[in-house]
Amino acid sequence: MPSFKQEKFIATESLDAYGESAERVVWEAIQQGFADKDCIAYWRYPIFSQRGKFRKEPDILIADTELGIIIIEVKSITIDQIVNIQGHRWQYQNYYAHYGNPYQQAENQLFSLLEYFKNEPSLNQKITARVVIALPNITENQWQMRGFDKLPSNPPILFQEQLTSAPIIYHYLQAITPVIKGDKVNEVQWQLLLSMLAGTPVYCQENHRVISTPQSRGKVLQKLRSHLSYFDLEQEKIAKQIPPGCQRIRGIAGSGKTVLLCQKAAIMHLKHPEWKIAFIFFSRSLYSTIIQQIDKWLRYFTHDKIRYNKHQQNLLIFHAWGSAKQQGFYRFLSQLIGLPPLSVNETAIQQPNEALAEACIDLLEKTAIPQVFDAILIDEGQDLIVNTWQYQGKQPFYWLAYQALRASNPVNPELKRLIWAYDEGQSLASFKPLNASEIFGDDLGHLVTGQYASGINKTETMKRCYRTPHSIITVAHGIGMGWLRSQGILVGMMQKAEWEMIGYEVEGNLIPGSQITLKRPLENSPNPLPNWWQGSLITFQHYSTRQQELSVLAEKIKHNLKQDGLRPSREILVIILGQFFDASKLETYVANFLIRQGIDIYLPGTDKCNSLKTNLVSQNPSQFWFEGAVTISRIHRAKGNEADMVYLVGLDNVAKDESNLHLRNQLLIGLTRTRGWVNISGINNYIMYQELKQVIASEGTFSFTFQPPLKRQITATDAGELLEQYALGRRDFQQADLRNAILESINLSDINLIGANLAGASLKQINLDRAKLILADLSHTDLTQASLKRAKLMQANLQNANLTGADLTGADLSDAVLVGTILQDAQLRDTILEDAIGQ
C-alpha cells in the first residue's frame, strides 16, 4: 500500500472561515491519530447530491486501508446547549439552529458518497463504512450525567477525552459498529476508491469501437482509455482546496492544469453558489474544452443533478478579451462600467495580448473598477503577460482582474481569490516571470509566497506530465530549451531545486564548465502508452522539397485512418510551425495539398470542412475541431488542445532561426499536444536537425557542459525568485517561504525577511548585514560564518541553528529563541540578547 505524507490531510478551505476552534481541534486530532496510517482525509469533501434537506458536505471524510470510509460530523456545542434528544432529533438552545439531526445528516452524507461506487462491482457494498459524531466541547461524563447514553438512538461519539490522544481515536473508530460491513481493501480496490474520490473518471476519454488490427494505434488507444488512471495526491490537493487569497499554479505541459482549474471552479461554485466566479482563458479555441470540463465536474459532484448553464450569472466562462458575438472578461467589465470597449484595431500595437493590455490600461485610467467577483481563475496565464505595457509597475490584465475582486476578508483587503495557472515554457509572446512582484508590483510581491494559516500553499508546482509520453516530453524540453545545442544551452535553471521542480534530476554541480547530466524519472511521466507500443513514439524526417514532405504526410494520415483505426477529428492533428507569415502561407498550402489527396481537413474558425477562407458572417472563432475532418492549425490556436497523433510540419521555419526562443517554444508546445505519437518533418538541411536527432537519441538523459543559459533563466523556486528580484533592486520579502533553501555565499544585505520561514535553510557565508529578520523562523538553519552585522532578529526562532563563526556585531536578538543554538566562535560584540530564550 502507498504511504502518504502529511499532504494526505486535505483541508479544502481555511478552517478559520467557519470561526470554530472546536472544529480545528477535531481536525488536528484526526491528523495525529492517522499520521502513520495509509489513508486520505478531507476537511469538507465536496458532496452535493440532494438527499432530503440535509447538507451533503461532510465535516471530515476519511478513507483508510484498514477502516474503510468514515464520516465525522462535528458539533461545536456544549452540554448546556442540548435541551433534548428524541430519536435522531436533537433540540438546541443558544445555538445557531433550534434543532438538528447530526447522525442522520452524516449517514445521508455517507450514502451520497457511496453512490459513486455503485458502478464498480469491487467497491459496491464491499467497503466498510462508519459514521460518528464529534463533540469536542463535551466530556463523556457530562453526556452520561444527562442520561443521553441510555437512549436507544445513542450514536457513536468522539468526546473531548478521545480527541486528546491519537491512539485512542484510531482504536475507538475501529471499535464502532459499521453502517456497512465490508472487508479490508486490497491494492486494486484502494486505487479504485482513491480514483473515485478524486473524480478521475471525469477526465478519462470515452471509449469507442475500433476496426483495425490488434497491434494498431487505435487498438492500443482502446487499452489506454480503459486503463485505471494514476492517483496523484498533489493534484488532488490542488484541485480540492479553495485558498483564502491569491494562488499560482505552475505546471509543465500535460500536467493537468486546465483540468484541475476547472474542478476548482466547479467546487467553488457548488460550495458557494452565492459567489460570483469568473474562469478566464486567452485562446478562443478553448471555449468548448473549458465548458465541457466544468460541466463534467459539476455533474460528477452532484450525481448529475447540476450542469453548467451559460445563463447562470454566478459562474461565468470568459475569453480574456471577448467580442461582439461572445462576451469576454474585459468587455464584461467595460459594459458593466458603462464605457465602450476597445477593439484590437483601435489599439496602438495590434497584437492580441499587447492590445488587450493597452485596453485594460485604458479602462483602469478612466474609472474605478467595481469589485464584482469573489473568485477569478485564469488558465494559461503566461499568455496574458506583456512586454510593452505596464500600469503603475503592474501587469495590466492581472491588475484589472485583481481590482475586480472583492476581498475575502475585510480585515485584510489584500486577500483576494485570484488564481492563475501557467507554464513559462509555453509562452509565445512575453518571457517575463509570473511572480507576484511582476504582476502586482513590489508592494504586493509577497502575495504568493509561503502558506495560508490553513496549510494551503500560495504557490503549487506540478512536475508530472500525464498527457505526453516520457520519450516525447523529454524531447520537447530538450529541443525547446536547447540543452544539447552545440553553441550553448538557451534556456535553463541555475539551481538543482529548480530543475527538480519541472521533474528532472541533476547529476553533477551547476558550476560553469562542469559536466552535468539531466534525467527525468519515469514516475514523472506516467503515461502508460510506451508499455503497449513496440515501435517509436516520435519520428523525425527531413526532405529535399515540400512536395516530398507533404506526400509522406498524406500517406501517413491515410494509414492512420484506414489501418490504425484513428478518427480524423480529435485523434489526428496537423500543426504548422513558423512565424506568422510563413506559417499562414504553409497552412494554406498543406490544406490544399491534403484536400487534393482526398483527405477532409478543417481550419479552425472556418464555417465548414475543406474551407480555406473565413466567412465573416458564419465564422466560429471558438471552433477547433470539425467532425470527420483532420484539423490543420498554427501553433497559437493549437495551444490547449491535444490529439493522439500529432504531425509537426515545417520544422525548417524554426531551424533557419534556431536561436529564436519564440520559435523553439512552438516546438515545445507542438510536441506536448500529443497523447501518443508525434511526427516531425521539414525540408532542406540545417544544423538544428542534427541537434534534434541527438535529443531524440538521448532517450530522456541529457549530458552536457553546464553554462548559464544564453537567452533565458527560469526561476521555479521561491529562493530563485528572491535572488532574481533582489538583483533587480527589490528588498521587501516579508513572509517569504524559504524552507530548506540553499542560499550560500551570496549578498542579501538590507533585505526585509520579517516573518519569513527559513527553517532548515543552508545560509553558509551569506551576507545578511542590517537584514530585518524579526519573527523569522531560522530553526535548524545553517548560518556558519554568516555576516549578520546590525541585523534585527527580535523574536526570531533560532532553535538548533548553527551560527558557528557568524558575525553578529550589533545585532538585536531581543526575545529570540536560542534553545540549542550553536554560537561557537561567533562575534557577539554589542549584540543585544535581552530576554532571549535559552541564552
Image: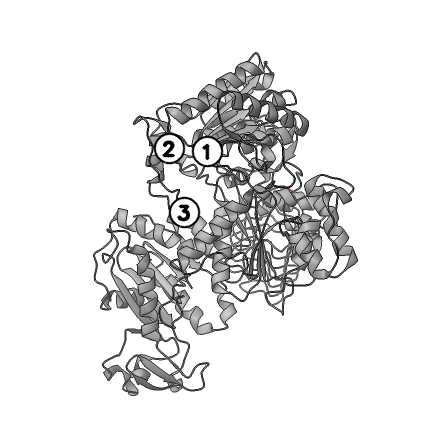
Considering only vertical position in the picture, is 689 above or below 798? above
Tag 2 residue: 529
Q: Position of residue 481 (x, y in %)?
A: 58, 30
Q: Which residues are magenta?
A: 744-757
- Residue sitting nearer the eye, 590 or 453: 590
Tag 1 residue: 628
Badge 1 or badge 3: first in the primary sequence: 3
Question: Quarter-wise, where is residue 92 in the image?
Answer: bottom left
Considering only vertical position in the picture, is 409 above or below 221? below
Label 3 neighbour load within 10 Å: few <14, some 14-19, many 20+: few
Q: Position of residue 596 (x, y in %)?
A: 53, 21
Q: Magenta span: helix, strand or loop, mainly? A: loop
Q: Mark 1 or mark 2: which is in front?
A: 1
Q: Please say whether residue 732 is visible from this viewpoint.
A: no
Badge 2 or badge 3: first in the primary sequence: 3
Q: Residue at x 67, y 49 (%)?
A: 324
Q: Which amino acid is tagged 3?
A: Asp
Residue 232 got which mark?
A: 3
- Residue sitting nearer the eye, 309 or 764: 309
